Amino acid sequence: MILIYNTMASQLTNVIELIHQDIHQTSKDVMHIIYVGVGAAAGMFNSNGLIDEQNYHEYPPFLQKIQEQINSAHIHIVLIDPILGNPPYSINDHSKGLHYIQNDTNFYTAKSNTENIFHVYCIRESVYIDGQYYHDGFINITQDLYHLNDMCMQESILMIYNDYTGRENKYVAEFYDDQINGYLDHIIYGIGARKEFGCYIDLLSIESQFAFKITERNRRMIKVLNIFNYLLGGYTIYNINSIIQEYDIENVDKISSQISCVIDQYISEFKNKSLYILKSIHRLIHLNDLTQIEFIILNINHKHRSRVELMIKNHSYQELQTYMKNIFARELDIICKLKDNGLTGHDLITFITQSEDPLQWYNQLGLL
């Protein structure tokens, strides 16, 4: 198979089309997995010049474990990094039992002893989505990921995306949550349940593993545990026991780890970011401290920014405060559900911010 590029499209656009073609050329009994690693180039070599498993971004252990337990699947590995080796490290790593054939400058295939077919696509670019930082020459892949999500929803394909560059996977996940809500059990943005790991994540840790099972929708597919599927997917009751039952008791450690990751992430973000935003809005209202405006705008999630800017332009500061409290309360709702503490996010945020002195708010954070 030779890559024929549409010169008007991005490299990722072309790769998604190639994957789409491969899906349609296989029967619905064949499972497909897509792994997208941004900033995935091999770089942390040990003293023997090899990559240890905990740093194996090009072919992470969670993907190895999934493919070892299935047969005759197609695994699509999309590596995006301007400093990818030529060929990438994983292509010449025969310790995995894979011997790749080069089909094109940026495209390799191999077959495992379980008849799984591997496709590795190399994109040597720096990329970003709307609202992320970027420099001249970076490629915007916002629309590409919309298209990839659409394909995975329509075709019941497992897709796992992770950014290793230090940017927040949580941001990307939340950016696409509205689009993929209802499909969060097979479209995953961020290893470790969206927890912020910076540029380093131990890929051998329990946080980096997935509980999964084989099922069927409109085709044979792999479904993975994603706590956000229960928190955001319209479930009226969040029940840890039903989740354990669905994914088997042997995966209880992975389930517990995901829950802890989510709680830690949301508590950390509320303490270190959300509360500062509320404090800045409080100063804007009560002290007319206009120096807070830049901080507020820069730290607001991109999808809320235009509305926040309009409220500030109209000097609707009380409305802005209510708007942001509602947003943060919805995030705190997630903590309340996971902790099963009988409270709501609005209960927490009302109690924490009840003092007229914002410095006193931090004394109430033990409630979290």
Image (cartoon, grey):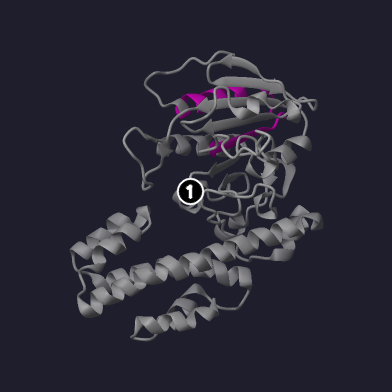
Q: How crowded is mark 1: few (under 14 residues within 10 Å), some or many (20 or more)?
A: few
Q: Where is residue 133 in the image (x, y as percent from the top left)?
A: 36, 46
Magenta highlight on residue 22 = yes
Where does label 1 land, which residue? Answer: 166
Please identify the quarter of the rendering in which residue 141 is found: top left
Q: In which quarter of the image is residue 343?
A: bottom right
* Residue for point 80% across, 58% down: 249
How far across and down, in percent of the image, does residue 323 sit? 34, 68
Q: In this view, does 141 lie to the left or right of 339?
A: left
Compare residues 221 and 257 and report the one nearer the observer: 257
Given the image, on which type of amino acid does mark 1 rest?
Gly
Q: Can residue 284 be seen in this view?
A: yes
The quadrant in which the N terminus is found is top right
In the image, the segment drawn in magenta is 12-37
176 displayed left or right of 220? left
Query: Looking at the image, can residue 25 be seen?
Result: no
Image position, residue 116 (x, y; %): 73, 27
Is 299 magenta? The answer is no
The foreground one among 79 and 313 is 79
Nearest the camera: 321 or 196?
196
- Quarter occupied by the C terminus: bottom right
Q: Which residue is drawn at 46% across and 75% down?
A: 346
Provide residue 220's location: percent of width, then percent of height: 71, 35
Farthest residue, direction front = 47
Q: Is residue 293 left or right of residue 339?
A: left
